Image (tube, grey):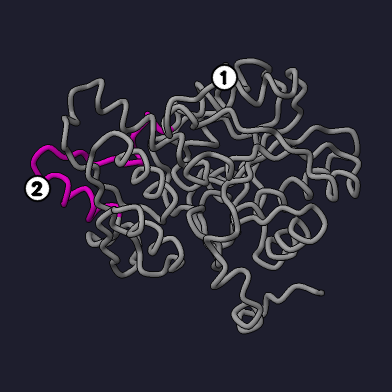
Amino acid sequence: MDIKTGFVGSVGNTPLIRINSFSDETGCEILGKAEFLNPGGSVKDRAALYIIEDAEKKGLLKPGGTVVEGTAGNTGIGLAHICNAKGYKCLIIIPETQSQEKIDLLRTLGAEVRTVPAVPYKDPNNYVKLSGRIAAEMENAIWANQFENLANRIAHYETTGPEIWAQTDGKVDVWVTSTGTGGTYAGVSMFLKEKNPDIKCILADPMGSGLYSYVKTGEVHSEGSSITEGIGNSRVTANMEGAPADDAIRVDDKEAVRVVYQLLEKDGLFMGGSVGINIGAAIALAKQMGAGQTIVTILCDGGSRYQSKLFNREWLAAKGLLPNP
């Protein structure tokens, strides 16, 4: 019998899906790790589980305690699920600019949710810094601190990377993904480079983020803006520090939206905006490198968390992002 033990036992071991339409177009094998099939619906379930279990092992989180986090949504959703499964309370600080679907879901899951103005990281009232201060003032509470907590990237070094290696029989030419905290990108990159130093590890970045510039020049510099949520950064996190990066590629919103709609209409995959960045980067790399490459990326989460924006044609039209029918 193959029975998973509750929510916690169901995290990980997601399939690797060939993206047929774009693979056929480019002559490369473009493969997406189906992280939207995690029980909490996103790649962030892995980091949430490792962060909580790391705090338990260290004796920092005791029965009845509270997990506090500043998040753009998906890590909070993963934390709320796992807190329910393990008997903890969950307090989420989230920028008010995030999709209403994610905010509503967090509340449905029983998390206490506080929305705050979206301000830059350097501002003391940035949602990440605010969540840290709130956690420090509470008894029997931990700050998940996903950006700096290395349990995040360890989750992907120990699970996501080995799964990709096994699922491809080690035949990976390129690993590419966007990043917010750095955990997924860094953990998988570190594992794959140990297995085969010739694997190209490439960071995908939306406009408005400084990580493309960081990889290219060593300095964090951003330009433009993006409608995507939960990816990009204006600083180098502890999870991102020391992660191998052979190159970086930037994908604009127009291409990301085009990709997301093709995934839906030709591949039957209903995906979130960050997947548009990831697959968009994979397509660009396939064209640069030529046919025959095996390129792996992440299908971070599903499109239902973004219906009011990404799948609202009036909203897209107002942004000048409406894809061709």
Badge number at residue 300: none
Along the line of sight, which residue is nearer the eye, 232 or 85? Answer: 85
Query: Which class describes the residues within 10 Å of circle 1: few (<14), some (14-19), or many (20+)?
Result: few
Q: What range is drawn magenta here?
A: 128-152
Residue 10 in the image: state x and y as whole percent. 49, 31
Mark closest to the chain's N terminus, 1 or 2: 1
Name the residue: 45% across, 39% down: 45
Q: Is residue 160 above or below residue 98?
A: above
Q: Amino acid at mark 2?
A: Glu
Left or right of 54 on screen, residue 202: right
Q: Secondary structure at mark 1?
A: loop
Query: Which class describes the residues within 10 Å of circle 2: few (<14), some (14-19), or many (20+)?
Result: few
Quarter of the figure that contains the N terminus: top right
Left or right of 162 on screen, residue 255: right
Q: Is residue 220 above or below residue 144?
A: below
Along the line of sight, which residue is nearer the eye, 309 or 4? Answer: 4
Q: Secondary structure at mark 2?
A: loop
User: Which quarter of the picture shows residue 61?
Assistant: top left
* The residue positioned farthest toward the front in the image shown: 1
Name the residue: 46% across, 52% down: 233
Q: Is residue 129 above or below residue 319?
A: above
Q: How far apart are labels 1 and 2 at the CA level?
A: 43 Å
Q: Amino acid at mark 1?
A: Asp
Disc 2 target residue: 137
Name the residue: 24% across, 37% down: 87
Left or right of 325 on screen, residue 215: left
Disc 1 target residue: 2
Assess whether residue 267 is covered by the magenta stretch: no
Residue 97 in the image: state x and y as whole percent. 41, 69
